[in-house]
Image: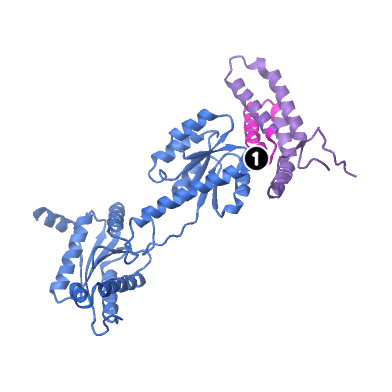
Chain colours: A blue, B purple
Amino acid sequence: MTESTSNNPVDEFKPIVLVIDDSVDVHRLLKARLRTEELEFREALDGESGLKVARDDSPTVILLDLDMPVMDGFEVLRVLKEDPRTLQIPVIVLSGLQSSQDKVTAFDLGAVDYVTKPFDLTELRVRVRSTIRMQRLIRMLAQKAQIDGLTGLWNRVYFNTRLTEELGRLSRREGNLSLAVLDIDHFKSINDTYGHPAGDGVIQGLAKLLQGEFRHTDSVCRYGGEEFGVIMPDTTLADAASVAERVRVAFERMVWPRHPERKTTISIGVAAVAGSGTLTVEAIIELADKNLYAAKSGGRNRVVATVADPRSVAGLRAAG
Amino acid sequence: MADPRPNPRFIVSEFADDPDMRELVAMFLDEMPDRIGMIEAASREGRVGDLRRLAHQLKGAAGGYGFGVVGEAAGRLEEALTAEASGSEPSADLVAIRAQVEELLDMCRSVRARASG
């Protein structure tokens, strides 16, 4: 998912259950009843602190008591469903046996299920289990839609989402951001000479190299056919250029099992934003692409890196 | 020797035979004298808000430890106190409420983890 901080997509799913209930006993009982489920628990004794935990820890599922003093469960549910940070978290409401109207209202407000108090052990377990299973599937599908099949790297969809997020962050507080665009030199000729499996092998080899060379906070993406993009948050132009150069050299030295006699090389364009930028996604990609083109026309197998000036790029775009 | 027959005066946890729950039920019973003391004090001193909160907590908790009837009695008391707080004739129900508090306290004093011993 987009909030992942890993440079390659890996599914590390450990369900977190947030219980919001004003009774210490209910927390104690739920923990005991769900002991066998391998869950991580967060506890809140009132609505206000429950909302805070929901925002900070993004739990997998929330068990929410309806009948609480000060801020009741309905109000908590309403706030959860209005906040984009907590909107997607499934909520199971804990309600008394006889209050069917409460359940209807809770469903209307966006609850996915309910459990009646006192808890029936089997029912509680299956309802929590099925909600977590559903959440796991949603997460998996969302992630699958953002993964490149050949390399296992993030794909273009993720690249665009992530770059938009990072530029948005930069417009709110000062910082650095670098973007590298890489392209395999004479890729068509490798395909034509040695066949497509050889070409795929080169793409996979580069993917592996990139995953190893970049930090886990960087996002390594396969942008198109033989083109890759790497988003590097908190990275200056100098640092980005030096990693790019290291990658270029390492790639040039690789020996390919299918064609050991033929070296392959990459060209890299790097663009960096410094300070609080108001650069658009299109503008930073355009600059990185321009540098990539300069690297190609300068003889390939090289890195060209420049800092983006938000005003001049905006002006350039306006003029063009 | 302990009498093996169930004592009808006692309210026994529905989870008496559930090993997963033994420890929790024991903890609940350990805390019961404190709870009874707080309910008695709130009732004696006429702290309606506190009494309602204690009844509310017991309503949510007792059933979970296998004492459904206690939870229901606590729920009835909470309802009566809520009605009393918003009612137009406050003094009329006080006698009934005192009786409900006594009934609940009697139940609280009768809870046991197991049928015998």
* Rendered position, A133 above or below A182: above
Left or right placement of residue A186 versus residue A238 in this view: left
Q: Position of residue B101 (x, y in %)?
A: 71, 26
Q: Chain of mark 1?
A: B
Q: Quadrant of the C terminus of chain A?
A: bottom left
- Residue at (29%, 82%) from the top-left corner? A255
Q: Secondary structure at mark 1?
A: helix
In the figure, residue B16 lies in which quadrant?
Answer: top right
The front one of B23 and A42 is: B23
Q: Which residue is mark 1?
A: B64
Query: Who is closer to the viewer here, A232 or A39?
Result: A39
Q: Quadrant of the N terminus of chain A?
A: bottom left
- How packed is label 1: few (under 14 Cα within 10 Å), some, or many (20 or more)? many
- Is residue B55 part of the magenta span, yes or no? yes
Amino acid beneath label 1? Gly
Check if residue B75 falls in the magenta segment.
no
Instruction: Point out the stretch of residues depicted in magenta.
Output: B42-68
Q: Is residue B95 left or right of residue A102?
A: right
Of all residues shown, which one is farthest toward the bottom?
A: A261
- The answer to whether residue A5 is left or right of residue A318 is right
x and y percent of residue A281 in the render?
23, 55
Residue B90 percent coordinates (x, y)? 63, 17
Taking the image as shown, residue A109 lies to the left or right of residue A197, namely right
Residue A33 appearing in the image: yes
